[in-house]
Image: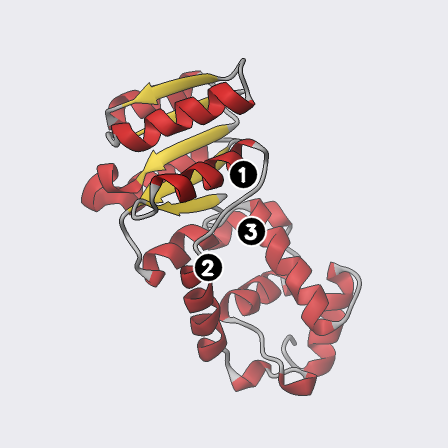
Amino acid sequence: MRFLVAGTDNCLFSKVNDIADVYKPNAQVVISSTIENMFLMLNNVKDFDLVFIDLDFLGKEWRYYMKRIISKIGDARLVIVTNKESVKIFSFLFDSGVYSYILKKYDGNVLKIILELLVRGFAYFPPELIRQYALEEDTAASSDFALPEGKHLTPRQRQVLICLGRGLSNKEIASELSISEATVKLHVNNLMRVMDVDNRTQIVLMAQKLGFLP
């Protein structure tokens, strides 16, 4: 198992190394303390399992760098570590397919538990940011896309639905909406759930029946 750790937070990343030693004794932890070296590693090494990125060390151009990182990591699971608790930043990264999101304010014991989960294959997101994200999605839902029983489609679900109506594949939807294929699959599954259908073809047929699609 191989981890890439990019940033300058020595305390946090030493814990990544310690956890890897305990739970994956044969794991290799590669440290990159500059952006240039980080991209050099991403370009030359294609088998990272977990990629830890210190969002704060990317600076003001973090959105630009994040898009580049996401385009290069392949099947690696991307973990963001940051001081930023903005729901807008979280929403951008969550919709982009980030695997986990860790806040630096967590104390050592909490951080240890989160890192153990990640090494064992589980994801983690701060509950407070997930709640705010869900609330904003619900608030932004349009009555034009109202479902039976008072349900609504979120803005992102509406975007994915329109793409499905155009016959786009998950890969094409991901490219058009600048999100990961894993995130597209998540939205498609949620569409099936809220529309009470079994596959993407039925999503489109139901949407046409409800007047959401022509």
Going by the numbered disc 1, the residue's amino acid type is: Leu
Question: Would residue 15 be found to the left or right of residue 23 on screen?
Answer: left
Instruction: Please tell me which residue lies in front, 213 or 178.
Output: 178
Q: Nearer the viewer, residue 53 or 175?
A: 53
Name the mark nearer the viewer: 2 or 3: 2
Residue type beneath disc 2: Pro
- The residue that appears at 71% across and 76% down in the rendered structure is 208
Give the percent coordinates (x, y) of residue 124: 50, 47
Is 24 located above or below residue 71 in the figure?
Answer: above
For the residue labelled by badge 1, is the local secondary structure a helix, a strand or a loop? helix
Mark 2 vs mark 1: which is more N-terminal? 1
Q: In the drawing, what numbered circle is on residue 183?
A: 3
Read off the residue under disc 1: 117
Label 2 secondary element:
helix
Q: Nearer the viewer, mark 3 or mark 1?
A: 1
Report which residue position mark 2 lands on.
127
Measured Cα–Cα span from mark 3 to mark 1: 20 Å
Would you place residue 10 above or below residue 104 in this image? above
Q: Quadrant of residue 198?
A: bottom right
Whole-percent x and y of residue 81?
35, 41
Of marks 3 and 1, which one's residue comes earlier in the chain? Answer: 1
Seen from the viewer's position, the closer of residues 135 and 41 is 135
